Image: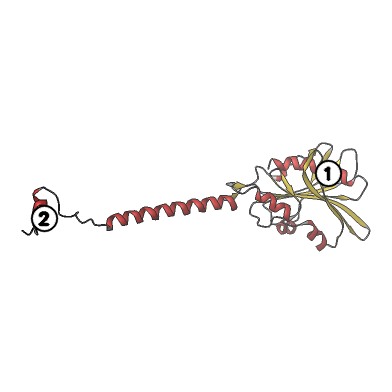
Amino acid sequence: MKRVGLVKPLQSLRGMPASAPPVDAKPVFLVRTIWTAVAVVVLLQGAGIAIERSFFPSAVRPPHHKLSDLPISLGRWTGTEMVLDPTTFAAVEANDQCARVYKISGGGDAVFAHSAAWISQDDWTPHLPEICYAANGWELLQSRTVALPGASNTRIALQTYQQPGKRVVVAYWYQMDHGTYADREDGRKLRREQWGLRERPPTLKTILQTGETDRAESELLELAAKIYEFNCGL
């Protein structure tokens, strides 16, 4: 006896389907595709934020107070305000500037002091003294970096320039918070330490100049240490 045709009726009687019901795969595939796309977008956004915070600080904060808040009296030094002519002020292209002449109470040579602050400045060493002095006819005779008194990790530049019949000694440094540098390479290292910050401090530049004497370098370092302390609060 042939049994062909009995299988399906028996399955129907037992409440069993002859085969698995067809399933529409399109909705499942679509849901998976949507969630995959969402996950990719989240990952890309997170990676973008991480890269931005690591390499591109979002903003440069302004100084906490004006450069002119630098005390007139700094230890044994007393300062006198100088008014910069508009042409010089504009040429520096800084957000804030301050110019003083400081003298020791008991006498001695005067020290010209100029400070500037930049909030939006892509140049890490704006108005590098070597370039500015050379452009004004000064010849660089000597240049080196030295540590500030009592701060072995804080270094500034000391230079000697000359014109016919005249020599001057110059001290300068760029500063961001407590860090200082005198050239672009050291500036790059300091900027690298700020990767990941939401904001970075303004770029400060301080330059001091006095006539060449036996006391010139020691007096410049003494005054520079006091101005550096003030700059740390900016």
Q: Position of residue 41 (x, y in %)?
A: 43, 54
User: As drawn, which residue projects farthest toward the front?
Assistant: 1
Compared across the picture, whether 46 is left or right of 205 comes to left
Q: Quadrant of the N terminus?
A: bottom left
Asked whether, in this view, residue 144 is left or right of residue 232, the answer is right
- Assign a secondary structure to mark 2: helix
Note whether residue 61 is visible. no
Q: Residue at x 87, y 38 (%)?
A: 105
The scheme the figure's colours follow is secondary structure
Relative placement, left or right, of 150 versus 7 is right
Label 2 CA crowd tier, 10 Å (few <14, some 14–19, many 20+):
few
Q: Nearer the viewer, residue 144 or 163?
A: 144
Q: Nearer the viewer, residue 188 or 216?
A: 188
Residue type at mark 1 is Leu
Q: For mark 1, does the 10 Å Cα neighbourhood hold few (<14), some (14 to 19), or many (20 or more) residues? A: many
Residue 115, position in %: x, y? 74, 49
Residue 73 screen position, x and y as percent: 79, 38
Question: Which of the 4 image quadrants contains residue 93?
Answer: bottom right
Q: Residue furthest top?
A: 75
User: Can you identify the residue that label 1 sits on?
Assistant: 221
The residue wearing badge 2 is 8
Position of the C terminus, as image quadrant, is top right
Q: Earlier in the sequence, mark 2 or mark 1?
A: 2
In three-dimensional space, the C-alpha distance between marks 2 and 1, rounded to whole angstroms, equals 103 Å
Residue 138 appears at what percent x and percent y?
86, 60
**Is residue 10 visible from the viewing direction of this image?**
yes
- Give amino acid for label 2: Lys
